[in-house]
Image (cartoon, rainbow, N blue to C red):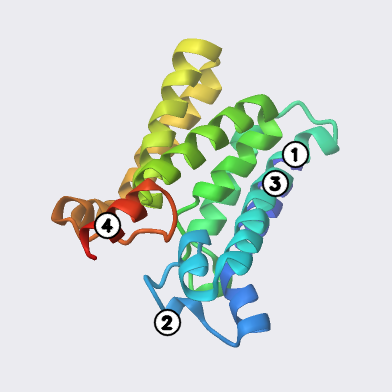
Amino acid sequence: MEIILMLIVAYFLGAIPSGVIIGKLFFHTDIRQAGSGNIGTTNTYRVLGPTAGTIVMVMDILKGTLAAAQPAIFHLPVNALLIGLAAILGHTFSIFIGFKGGKAVATSAGILLAYNWQFFLIASAIMFTLVYLTSMVSVASMTSLTLVSLIAIFYYQDWILSVVAVVLTIFIFYRHRANIVRIKAGTESLVHFGLGWRRYQAKHR
């Protein structure tokens, strides 16, 4: 019963549509109707600016962290990653916005933070480095999840972490399938900082 309750709580935590809430409360904007239509950090940053984007990113990370931290909070012998998966399900298929949602990159990072904060820092460093190099959050997300999976398998040798990381990597690639088409076509959106953005500006002067 305790596991079921934790999964339910994790789902509803993950289902909180941070981008929609911040957009409507403070900017009178529904980000689902602007930019890419996604409710996550990247589209919030693009539509509402860096402050709103950062707030949404932190909120989405904390959703995953709180969900996955439940076993530790309640002193129950359940793997945090398994409970955290329900938060990813909630974020991706939110009951509050018609079972639609985001791509769950930040929420996945939050789950990792609850499970292994050192690995979270490594994964975050990889992600932000790739964003800076490419100026494409989609490329950074898919590449960093792939690298995280390899590190989990070959360095940590934690089979639960490895399986969850691989499953999430496949899921993230699936959620980014439209981005992959745009990347191949050379039409993927860039964030307005980093080396990729500088190259783009230099090319179009």
Which of the two labelled residues, at mark 1 and mark 4, occupies the earlier sequence position? Answer: 1
N-terminal-most mark, 3 or 2: 2
Where 186 sits versus 21, above or below? above
The alpha-carbon separation of the residues under discs 3 and 2 comes to: 29 Å
Q: Up-down: is 183 above or below 3?
A: below
Q: Amino acid at mark 1?
A: Ala
Q: CA distance from mark 1 to mark 4?
A: 46 Å
Labels 1 & 4 near each other (Cβ < 8 A): no
Q: Does residue 45 appear to the left or right of 187 in the view shown?
A: right
Name which residue type carries label 3. Answer: Ala
Q: Which mark is residue 69?
A: 1
Q: CA distance from mark 3 to mark 1?
A: 6 Å
Which residue is at a point 60% across and 50% down the rendered structure image? 87
Does label 2 or label 1 sit earlier along the sequence? 2
What's the mark number on residue 127? Answer: none
User: For the N terminus, which image quadrant?
Assistant: top right
User: Does dot 4 land on a helix, a strand or a loop?
Assistant: helix
Q: What's the amino acid at mark 2?
A: Gln
Nearest to the eye among marks 1 and 4: give it. 4
> Which-is-in-front pick, marks 4 and 2?
4
Image position of 125 (left or right of 77): left
Residue 17 visible: no
Element type at mark 2: helix
Q: Position of residue 126 (x, y in %)?
A: 49, 33
Residue beneath disc 2: 33
What's the CA distance linking mark 4 and mark 3? 44 Å
Q: Are marks 4 and 2 in contact (CB under 8 Å)?
A: no
